[in-house]
Amino acid sequence: MSPHPDSTVVETQSGGAVSSPADDAAAMLVGAVKRYGSGRSAVVALDDVTLAFPAGKFTAVMGPSGSGKSSMMHCAAGLDRLTSGRAFVGSTDLSTLDDRELTLLRRERIGFVFQTFNLVPTLTAEENICLPLTLSGRRPSGEVLDQVVSMLSLGDRLHHRPLELSGGQQQRVAVARALVARPQAVFADEPTGNLDTRSGQEILGFLRSAVDQHQQSIVMVTHDPHAAAWADQVVFVVDGRVHDVMDGPSASSVLDVMKDLGR
Amino acid sequence: MSEMVRSAARSALASRGGFLLTGTAIALSVAFLAATLVLSDSMRGRAASDIAEALAGTDAVVQGVEVGEPGGGPGDPARSVQRSLDPDITERVVAVDGVDAAASQWVGFAKLVVDGSSVGAGTASDVGRNWVADPALNPFRLASGQAPTEVGQIAIDRSLARDADLAPGDTVQVLTATGMHDATITGVATFASADAAPLQRTVLFPDGAVPAWLDPAAPTQVLVELAQDADRAEVLGRLSALSDGQVVDGPDHIRTMQVAATSPLEFLNVFLLAFAVVAVLIGVTIIFNTFALVVARRRRESGLLRAIGAERRQVLGGVVIEAALVGTVATLVGLALGVAGVGALRWVVGLTGVTLLTGPSIVSATSIAIAATVGIGTTILSAWIPARRAAATPPIEALRESAAEPRRVSPVRTASGLVLAAVAAVGGAVAVVGSNPAWLGLVAAVVPALVLCGPAIVTASAHLSAPVARRVAGVRGAIAAGNLAASPRRSASTALALILGTAMVTLFAVFASSLTSGVGTDVREGLQADLVVTSATPDVSTIDPTLAGRVAALPGVDAVATLAKAEGIVAGAAESIGGIDPTTLAAVFDLDLVAGDLTDLRSGGVAVVGDDPTLLGGTLQIEFGRSTIDAPIVAVVARSTGGFEAPLYFVDDATLEASAGRMLDALVFVDLADGAGADVEDAVRSLVRGAPGAFFETRAEHVAGSGSEIAAFGSFIDGMLILASVIALLGVANTTALAVRERSGEIGLLRAVGTTRQELRGIVRLEMGLLSLVAASIGIVVAVGFGWALIDLTGGTEIPSVVVPWTRLVVTFVVAVAAGVLAAAWPAFRVSRVPVLELVARGR
C-alpha cells in the first residue's frame, strides 16, 4: 500500500472553516447535522460534521454501533437529507436538489453497494450490473463492462438470476453495478458484513484495485478493522462527530483506536 | 383462550392498514349479498302477501283449462293459452248448491291514455278488468271516489293515479283490443292494501263496458264464494262437473298467482345472486391474499413458537381468531351497509324497467344469517388455509426461510388444472357436437381449472411478456414482468378476480348481442317498408287497429300492412301466431318464400316459418283460446316479421280474429309512394303521434331498434358491473399494496440506484397492467367459448346464431386493463412517497 500524502480530510468541530467544496473532494459534508425525532426523545446522529471524502481514494468510515457512521454515509450519498448543513457530491449541493434531481444524481454520479438486498431478483446479473445505466437510457460501453466483468470474474454468471448465485457472487455483481458507470463516488455500506472471510477479502480486493487502476473514489462504512485496513484512510466517528482520521491504516492500528473508543 | 383473543385483537389492530382493505372487501361483499337477499325477499314477500290478502275472500275459481307451459320472466311471457269457458258459466255456477255467490271476472289488455299519451312504462303489464260488485270477491278496494257503474266510467289503481296525477272526475282515454274509448275516472282503487297489483297497471270498468271494450267470448274466470256450511270438497266436485273448465281451490289459486307474479322477479334474482356470488368470490381472494401474507410474515415467529414447544393448534389459533374478529366486525358493517343499500340496488334493478313494489324492505332472519355466515365463514376459511400451511412447516424450516412464497409452481397442481381444463373443453365440444346440453355441466370445471393453473399461467405470461415489456418499457418493463412471476400464487388469485369479472361481462354481452341480432336479422333482411309503426311495449300489441286504415288514406302512402299476433298451441307448445293480409304484406316485407303461395292463406291456410319445403301440403293444428283450427300448410317462408316474439306461423288476419278474438295490431308497415317527400313522412308521423301505444320509426330506426328491448337489460347489467367492479378494484389495490410492501427492500434498492418516483410508479402500474391484460384476455376467451356453446345449444329459434360483440368486448378489455392500472395507482403512489432508507430498512 502506498502512502497518500495528498489525503485531505478537513476536520473542524466549530463549522464554517470550509464553506465550499474542495476541488479534489468526491463528496463532502459541511456543518452537517442529522437529528431524528424531536423534543426530549430526539437523537442526534450527526453533530455538526464537516468532512471531505477525497477523490480517487478509498476511505473507510468506522465507529461503534450508533455512532452515526451510517447516517453520515446516507446523507453524503443523497439517500437521506440533513437536518441542517450541506452535503456535496463533487460541486453539487444536495440540499438544493428536489427528490427527482437527487434520484437522477444517484443514478448518474453515485454507485451503491449494500450489505443485503443488493440486487433486483427479477433481473439477470448483467441486467443488474447495467441497471443504473439503462435507467438513464444509456448503454454501458462494452469495453468498461468487459473490464469490470473480467476483473470480478463474473463472465460465466452474467445470465444467471441473483437467486442462482452464491452470496459472494451476488456481492460481486453489486460491486460491478456500482463500478460500471464510473461514478463520481461509490458508497459501500458494510459490503462484506454478510460474507465469509474469503469472499469478503475478494470484494475488498476488487474495490482496492478499482481505486488503484481507475482512480475510483470509494467510501465504505464498516466495523471490521481488517476491512478498514484496505482503505487509504480511516475516519473514526463517535457520537455523531469525527473523532479521528488515520492515514495508511493497518488492521492492528485500527483495532487499537477502536479499543480506545470502546473504553 | 381469552389471552389468545386479546393478543389476536392487538395484532389485528397493529396491522390496521392491511386489514382495513380486507375489512372493506368483506364488508362490501356482505353488503352486496345482504342487499340482494333483502331485495328479493321484499319483492317476493310484498307480492305474495298482497296477493294473499287481495284474494282472501275468493273460495274457489273456475277458469279455462290452461294449455302449454307457464312463462319465466321479462321477455318470456306466459307461453300458455287458456281455453275459453262457456259464455253462460257464471249463471250455472251461481245455481250450484253450496255456492253463496259468484262473479264473472273478465281480464284483458287496457292501457290508460292521458292527453294523448299512455301512462306507465317498463315491464309491468297493462291490465283491464271488470269491477266486481261483490266486495268479498273483488281483489280491489276503493280508496277514494265511487265504483264505476256506467259504460265510460272507470276506476284506476292508486299507482296509476299517482304516476299520472289523476283523481276522480278527470277524463281520460282507455286503449283496449277494440280501440280507443273515452272514460271518466270515478274512483281510485288499491289491490288489497297495495297501490297496485304486482307488476300490473290496472284499469277497472263496469260489467256493461266489457263487451265493447274487451270483446270477450266468455269470462276469464268465475270467482266463487262458498256457503258457510257447505262441504267444500263436495261443492268443488259439483263445480267441476259443470263444464270442461278447471276448478281451482282458493289457497291453490293464491299460490299460483303468487308464483306468476314473482316469476319475473325470480329471473332477476338469479342475475342478482350471480353477481353477489362473484362479489363474494372476489372478496374471498382478497381476504385469502391478505391472510396468506400475514401468515407468511409471522412464519418465523410461529416457527420460534413451535421450536419452543407450542402446539400446532396454538400457533394456528391466533390467526384464525384474528380472522374471526376482522370478519365479524366487517360483516356487521356489511350487513348494515347492505340493508341500507337496498335502495341503491332497487335503483339499479329499476334500470330494467321492472317497477318494484313500494313499501318497506323485508329483512328476514334467513337473509341476515346467510350473509353473516358467508362473511364470517369465508374470512375464517381464508385465514385457516394459509395458517394450516404455516403450522405444517417444520419449525426449523420456518425459522430459516424468508417470508416470500415459493416461486416454483407445483407441476402436480398445474397438471390437475390442465386435466380439468381438458374435461371442460371436451364437455363443451361433446355438448355442441352431440346437441346434448347435459354435457355442458362439465364446462363448470373451467373455474377450478383456472384456480389450479393460475400460477402457471401467470408465470408463463410473465416469461412471454417479458421481451415485449422490455422492448416497450426497457428495463422497467423487464422488472414489471418479472415481478408478476415473483409471487405466482398471489398474482394468480388477483387475476382470478379479474377473470371472473370480465368473464361475467363478456358472457352477458355475447348473450345480449346474439339475442339482439337474432331478433334483428329478419328485419334487416326482409323489411321493405319505408316506415314502421311499433307497439309501445315490445311483448304486447298496443296499436289501435283503426290506425292502419287512417295511414293508408293519407295521400302519398303507397301500401300499408298490419301484423297481429296471438298465442296458439302448436304440438303442445305455445307459439306466437301472426295474422296478416298476404297481399298487402308482400309489398312491404319479404318473408322469403321457400315453397307454396302466400295468397292461399286467404282460404284458411297457414304459412310455416322454416326452411323445409316438404312441410307443404301437411296439416297444422293450432289451438287458440276460443277455437282450434286445422289448417293446411300452404306456404313455407324463410323469414318472420322480426322483433321480439316474432310469429313462427302466419295465418290470414280474418282467420286469426275469428279464432283468437279481436286484438290490437303489433306492427304496421307503411310504404310510401315513389318520390313521396318528407311532408308525407311527417303526415304519417303526426298521425302516429296521436295514437297512444304506437311508435313511429323509419326503416333505419326500426332495423336498429329491433332487439333494443334487450338494451334496457344491458343497462341493468352495466349497473351491476359498476357495483361488482368496485370490489374487484379493491382486490387489485389490496394485492398491489401487499406485493409492494413485501418487496420494499427491492424497491428501496431501485430507488437508491436511481429509479425516480415516477418510474417506480410506472413499474407497479405496468405490472398490474400486464396482469389485468392476461386476466381480461382469459376471461373474455373463456366466456366467449362458454357463451358460444350455451347459445348454440339452448338458443333455439330466438337466438339462431352466436354474434360476438367485438366493439363491446374491446371496450370491456380496455376498461378491465385500465381499471387494474388505476387500482394499482394508489399503492404505487404511496410507496413512491416512502423515503428510500425506510424501504431499504423494511426489507431487512
Image (spheres, coloured by chain):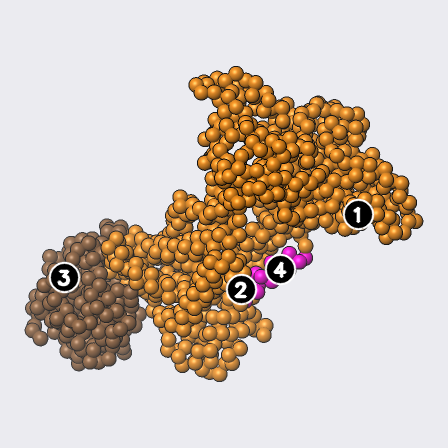
The chain that hosts pointer 2 is B
The span from disc 1 to disc 2 (Cα, nearest Å) is: 53 Å
The chain that hosts pointer 3 is A
What shade has chain A been given? brown
The span from disc 1 to disc 4 (Cα, nearest Å) is: 40 Å
Chain identifier of the orange chain: B
Say what amino acid the circle numbered 4 marks. Answer: Ile
The span from disc 3 to disc 2 (Cα, nearest Å) is: 53 Å
The span from disc 1 to disc 3 (Cα, nearest Å) is: 99 Å
Numbered badge on residue B63:
none
The residue identified by callout 2 is B379
Q: Work out whether B367 lies above or below B258.
A: below
The reply, left or right, for residue B724 in relation to residue B741 is right
For residue B378: magenta? yes
Dot 4 crowding, Cα within 10 Å, few <14, some 14–19, many 20+: some
Q: How many marks?
A: 4
The residue identified by callout 3 is A182
The chain that hosts pointer 1 is B
Numbered badge on residue B247:
1
Q: Secondary structure at mark 2?
A: helix
Q: Quadrant of the C terminus of chain B?
A: bottom left
Which of B391/B529 is in front? B529
User: Which residue lies at the image location 25% right of the left edge and 53% below the top edge?
Assistant: B472
The span from disc 4 to disc 2 (Cα, nearest Å) is: 14 Å
Q: For marks 4 and 3, give the one nearer the viewer.
A: 4
Q: Main secondary structure of the magenta part?
A: helix
Among the two numbered marks 1 and 4 on one chain, the one whose residue lies closer to the N terminus: 1
Q: For marks 3 and 2, give the one nearer the viewer.
A: 2
Numbered badge on residue B370:
4
